Amino acid sequence: MIKVSVIVPCYNEQATITQLLESILTQTYPLDEIEVIIADGLSTDDTRAKIHEFKTKHPDLALKIVDNHLRVIPAGLNRAIEASQGSFIIRMDAHSIPDRYYIQRCINGLEEGFGDNVGGIWKIKPGALSWMAKAISMAVSHPLAAGGARYRIGGTAQEVDTVPFGAFHKKLIDKIGMFDETLLSNEDYEFNARIRQAGGRVWLDPCIHSIYFARTTLKELSRQYWRYGYWKAQMLRRYPQTLRWRQILPPMFVFTLIVLGILAIFFQLVRWLLAIIVILYTIIILGVGILMSLKHRNPSLAIGVPLAIVTIHFSWGAAFLWGCVRKPVRSEPQK
């Protein structure tokens, strides 16, 4: 009997989808009680072929594909939930690899009543072998870039605002509703905000962990954090009380630089102030890069980590500001 439904939104993930499926195949949880539902956004690469190949080789794992015509993550999650049979839902991503105890520990957390949505931490790995990919993977898990998000930097078991790949009772959907399909990002945070508003708890257990592959280039990283920042602003229109200090710092910094940059055209004192801020910021992020390069004995991190942190701060900050003044016109496919 199917007890756990693992739902996976997917689009053009031929490079990693097999790794995810293999990690589910080796879970300690009984395989005959697991089903995997992949909501594919009509992939144009070999993703579906990889899935069908895996299904043929491993018929003992219940595996099905549903179409996600809207090609956005929350819609994919909802289509997978609609097709699910299990009493527990676990949300995963196609470019992640859960630890072999992931499902068991998530279900244990739910059954023991620790939270209404239970998840763990990311162990972020490079998405490629390049020096920049390695630097990006280091940067996105550093507190200066991650902003204290527990699922990125770790910590003790505790109640948190959000977890990325959570597990919850399917009946929770009847209480708070499905994932919000109008959001192209921050759908997990918004879902968890509704859990907390309804009096529920979101629980993070550091013993639950998965590998998450970071973006491989600064361009990809910039697009990712632009999307995060923009859709965070849209989500905050509905849930302003969920704003945290770590989320407002990048847009405040970008806004300050813009204002000072304009005023510096007219005032000498402002030019000095702007220069001091830029110099201090540069010293701080270069210091982080140097420390990480020494720690990991990798000189390229001294340059790559600061570049990645700058990309995160300015992409997130600028997109957040843009999202505050501009509402979305329509949804676009999310990659």
Image (tube, helix red, strand yellow):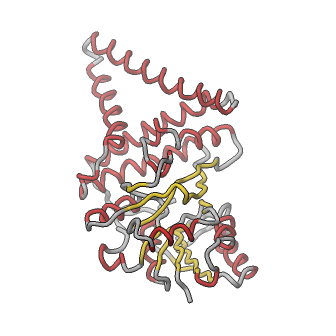
Toward the bottom, the furthest residue is 1
Location of residue 22 in the rendering, given as x and y in whole percent from the top left corner: 69, 69
In this view, the residue in front, 224 or 239, is 239
Rendered residue at 29%/23% (across/down): 260
In this view, the residue in front, 140 or 34, is 34
Location of residue 276 in the rendering, given as x and y in whole percent from the top left corner: 38, 15
In this view, the residue in front, 274 or 59, is 59
In the rendered structure, the answer to whether residue 72 lies left or right of residue 216 reads left
Rendered residue at 69%/41% (across/down): 130
Q: Is residue 25 above or below residue 3?
A: above
Dividing the picture into quadrants, the one containing residue 23 is bottom right
Dividing the picture into quadrants, the one containing residue 8 is bottom right
Circle count: 0
Rendered residue at 32%/80% (across/down): 174
Rendered residue at 63%/49% (across/down): 125
Toward the top, the furthest residue is 268
Location of residue 335 in the rendering, given as x and y in whole percent from the top left corner: 52, 59
Q: Quadrant of the N terminus?
A: bottom right
Dividing the picture into quadrants, the one containing residue 238 is bottom left
In this view, the residue in front, 259 or 316, is 316
Toward the right, the furthest residue is 57
